[in-house]
Image (cartoon, helix red, strand yellow):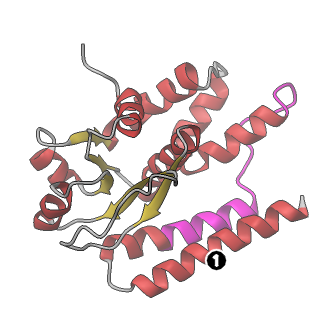
Amino acid sequence: MNKNNIEKIKNFLSFKENKTLLISPTSEETSCFYESLLKNLSVINNIKLSNKEYSKVNETSNDLFEAKRIYLYFIANSKQVEEIGNLDFQKVIFTDYKNYKKFAKIYVSINGYDFEKDMKIFLKDHLKISDQRLIEYCISQPHLTFSEISKYNINKNNYIIGSPATNEENFIFEIRKDIFKLKRSQTDVKKMFSKIKKEAKYKKFNFLIY
């Protein structure tokens, strides 16, 4: 029986034998969804996710006394995807559909075109959320999925579905879009990590306000 994509991701995170997970998002918004999904499931499994630059050398290791670590790569070059994919440690590679078709039979792979189905399975089966209004909203705004889930869980009875994104959410997503583009191009790693730090600071500050 074929596993759905959510089960594939959960199994990948649970078993060290699976070394490479390939994800092909269709847009920046769906990329945000899958990256946030990985972070959510990683916390549950006591796994640390780290962004990693392209390198032919395996410089990674898991300390016996530290949480398990999995690395995230954003690579469009087919040769680099294959080189990183064959290294002997766990990693998730975000890439394009061309590479998905090329490597789908070699690595555990997620097709971003299935994101609506993945969204429904994650919300209904994993989080036990059956509110159809929320599900439809998350499908239409995948990059806001986890902020909407938080709103829903805080006040299920008075939750207003489809409320427009706040300025804070739009600001954070614009930062994430910049990060996504920088990860894909890999032309300015220093600038990328500066953006990541900016996002973390803004989210922390925003949390303190509320």
167 displayed left or right of 200 = right
Residue type at the position of mark 1: Lys
Q: Could you tell me residue 148's position as x and y percent?
A: 69, 42
Quarter the N terminus occupies: top left
The total of numbered circles placed on residues is: 1
The structure residue drawn at horizontal position 64% and vertical position 22%, both measured from the top left corner, is: 129
Q: In this view, does 157 lie above or below 182?
A: above
Q: Which of 164 and 66 is in front in this view?
A: 66
The residue sitting at 51% across, 54% down in the picture is 48
Query: Which residue is pictured at 51% across the width and 44% down the height?
Result: 42
Residue 5 x/y as whole percent? 35, 31
Residue positioned 68% across, 47% down in the render: 147
Q: Name the residue under label 1.
A: 198
Residue 44 in the image: above or below residue 168: above
Horizontal and vertical percent position of residue 186: 32, 78
The answer to whether residue 75 of the structure is visible from this angle is: yes
User: In this view of the protein, which residue sits in the foreground, 173 or 80?
Assistant: 80
**In the drawing, does residue 92 fall left or right of residue 36?**
left
Q: Is residue 51 magenta?
A: no
Residue 160 appears in the picture as rendered: no
Taking the magenta stretch, the answer to whether it contains residue 167 is yes
Which span is picked out in magenta?
Answer: 155-178
Q: Label 1 crowding class (10 Å Cα cut-off): few <14, some 14-19, many 20+? A: some
